[in-house]
Image (cartoon, grey):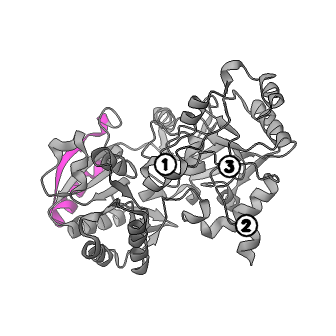
Amino acid sequence: MTLSYINELQSFLKEEQIITDPVLTQKLSRDCYWYSPILDEELKDMKADAVVIPENLAEIEQIFAIAFEHKQPVLFKGSATGNYGQIVPLQGGILIDTKLLNKIIEIKPGEVRVEPGVKIGMLEKTLRENGQELCIFPSTYLKATAGGFVSGGSGGIGSITWGNLWDGNVIELTILTMEEKPNKLIISGDELLNYIHSYGTTGFIAEIVFRTSEKTEWIQQIISFENLDDSLRFSEKLAYTSSIQKRSVSTCEWPIPTYFKPLSKFIQEGKHVVIIEINEEASDELQRLAEEWHGEVTYTILAENYHKGLTLSDYTWNHTTLWALNANEQMTYLQASFDLNRYIEQVALIQDQFKDEFYQHFDWMRMDGKVVPQSIPLVRFSTKERLDEMVRFCESIGIKIFNPHTYLLEAGGWEAHISSVLRTKGKNDPRALLNPGKIRVTLSEIVN
């Protein structure tokens, strides 16, 4: 990094907005990639040359212009709750921390416009105070930022009803391009696919318009089952039961519940559990459905205590993996999409093949309006070769694996959209300065 480069930043940023201390820049250059022992080894020494904390979009435009002139890589940081090394600089450069860009700009019926640094938890609280709520949000919502969720996430709490981010849950994005004179683009419709879950490789997300829905009074429950198949069939039936509003349906095979230490007094020995969020009025119908599949409601958090103190969504999605890691550092995870017509058979085949190396954890959701048994299974890590063997076996029996042990966008399940993302990147980032290295494939390679 040249002295003139730093001097140019100092000409319009305050001293506390520029961080170059190597120890601190390395700390700020990390996200939760350590969920993966493979990424932990690959990324642990990577860091930015400088972290900058802009106060407004005008400052980001100036940072972009300087980076473009000096051919410096630029990346973006929210709260660093991602798991794939999305924010980790592979080639040094500038890491832009968005924490001061944290305004809720406008709330309207059915939508909310925000800056990228807004914390999802604060946004959800504000919306509920105004009679609305987010359609979907990550299990890390208390820390996660809006920009980080859109740039590095996909689905979460609410996806059982509303699908993924690209299923209409992002209405519009304002994008800043990486050019000599950065342009501001308004993106909507199908073009959003080039920016959602693209790791900031196609532009800076300056504003987001999320879809919202009417506020619902949610209760949270744990339902316990003797039989894993019963817990899965119950979850499937609940996913299809339109008379019960749902925000979350998460199925965990025993012994995963033993990792949930704060819930220990509500966990029964040897029982598989389903963790749910449903509308308050449906509790009696839910009770009947649970009994039909030999399940027992063993814990309930009433709607009046929703998101106050203990919250069951903290044990779903990739939070489940975090509890396992806290309990046993040898555990890691995969991301998978099972076949709705074969998932019971697929689960049995995995059990026969891998025994206690592979524990089932499903977070049921809708994709393109269809119910999908989406899974974040826990696996016992020994070697990369054994992990690859698990992936190959799953794919051989019809399970789609989205590899969480790579920082490459095209290798983590985004291959269907990568050519369109690359074309967009070519227009918006002609010097390939935005998060370089996170896309290795080239457009010509795809075409050829």
Q: Earlier in the sequence, mark 3 or mark 1?
A: 1
- Specify the amino acid type for callout 3: Asn
Q: Give above or below for 247 relative to 241.
A: above
Q: Residues within 10 Å of mark 2 (few under 14, many from 20)?
A: few
Q: Position of residue 407 (x, y in %)?
A: 56, 56
Q: Residues within 10 Å of mark 1 (few under 14, many from 20)?
A: many
Q: Give above or below for 351 relative to 384.
A: below
- Tell me the magenta residue range: 281-305
The quarter holding residue 348 reads bottom left
Q: Which mark is residue 33?
A: 1
Give the Cα distance between marks 3 and 1: 16 Å
Q: Position of residue 320 (x, y in %)?
A: 34, 50
The N terminus sits in image quarter:
top right
Left or right of 377? Residue 108 is: right
Residue at which label 2 appears = 442
The C terminus sits in image quarter:
bottom right
Q: Position of residue 149 (x, y in %)?
A: 55, 46
